[in-house]
Image (cartoon, rainbow, N blue to C red):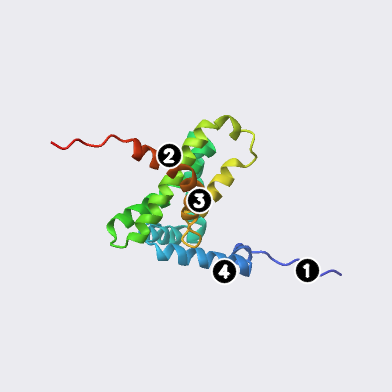
């Protein structure tokens, strides 16, 4: 005489699927806090409306949209386009903010970033035949550019001081010395 089978109703199945792992709930809460911190950029009001309509957390919808955008970029230009866009968007935004601010420190940070970015882009185009041989090149590139512009690391300043300046400045000084002087009338 076995135990009678339990009735499973639609609502009990729904409740079982709604229970999430505590770490997942914590992650969703952190993503939601991030989205709320940047309501205009993240379209927080629209996400909240979609959350109400679909019953899915805003974080799921946000990551779905991000996945869709990345998929479109990948289909248009592959990982190169994705890495170039990621290396451009945040620094461009911060550069616009730096132009409008009175603080010269952020101007220096973003000018050095763009010098390193430009030099890297030139070297990347010249050595493009080597890129195919480097595993996970574009992932490494994205991580490198994130390090260059991250406020905690400010890697662009380090790369400029350690790599760019020692090799470029002697040529600039020689160029300036050879520049013809203006004649005084």
In space, the residues marked 3 and 2 are separated at their CA atoms by 18 Å
Between disc 3 and disc 1, whose residue precedes?
1
Q: Residue at x 55, y 32 (%)?
A: 127
Q: Residue 159 carries which label?
A: 3
In space, the residues marked 3 and 1 are separated at their CA atoms by 71 Å
Residue under numbered circle 1: 4
Q: Name the quarter where the N terminus is drawn.
A: bottom right
Is 126 in front, or is 137?
Answer: 126
In space, the residues marked 4 and 3 are separated at their CA atoms by 37 Å
Q: Residue at x 62, y 42 (%)?
A: 136
In space, the residues marked 4 and 1 are separated at their CA atoms by 38 Å
The 10 Å Cα crowd at callout 2, few under 14, some 14 to 19, many 20 or more, is: few
Q: In this rendering, which labeled residue sits more in front, label 2 or label 4?
A: 2
Between disc 2 and disc 1, whose residue precedes?
1
Q: In this rendering, which labeled residue sits more in front, label 3 or label 1?
A: 3
Residue under numbered circle 2: 171
Between disc 4 and disc 1, whose residue precedes?
1
Is 18 in front, or is 66?
Answer: 66
């Amino acid at each position: 005489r076995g135990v009678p089978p339990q009735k499973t109703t639609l609502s009990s199945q729904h409740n079982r699927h709604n229970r999430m792992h505590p770490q997942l709930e914590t992650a969703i809460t952190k993503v939601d806090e991030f989205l709320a911190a940047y309501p205009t950029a993240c379209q927080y009001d629209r996400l909240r409306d979609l959350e109400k309509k679909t019953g899915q957390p805003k974080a799921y919808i946000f990551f779905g949209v991000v996945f869709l955008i990345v998929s479109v970029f990948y289909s248009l230009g592959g990982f190169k386009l994705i890495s170039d866009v990621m290396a451009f968007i945040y620094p461009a935004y911060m550069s616009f903010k730096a132009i409008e601010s009175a603080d010269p420190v952020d101007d220096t940070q973003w000018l050095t970033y763009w010098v390193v970015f430009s030099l890297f882009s030139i070297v990347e185009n010249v050595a493009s035949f080597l890129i195919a041989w480097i595993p996970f090149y574009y992932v490494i590139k994205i991580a490198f550019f994130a390090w260059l512009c991250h406020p905690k690391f400010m890697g662009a300043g380090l790369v400029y001081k350690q790599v760019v300046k020692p090799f470029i400045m002697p040529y600039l000084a020689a160029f300036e010395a050879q520049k013809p002087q203006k004649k005084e009338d």
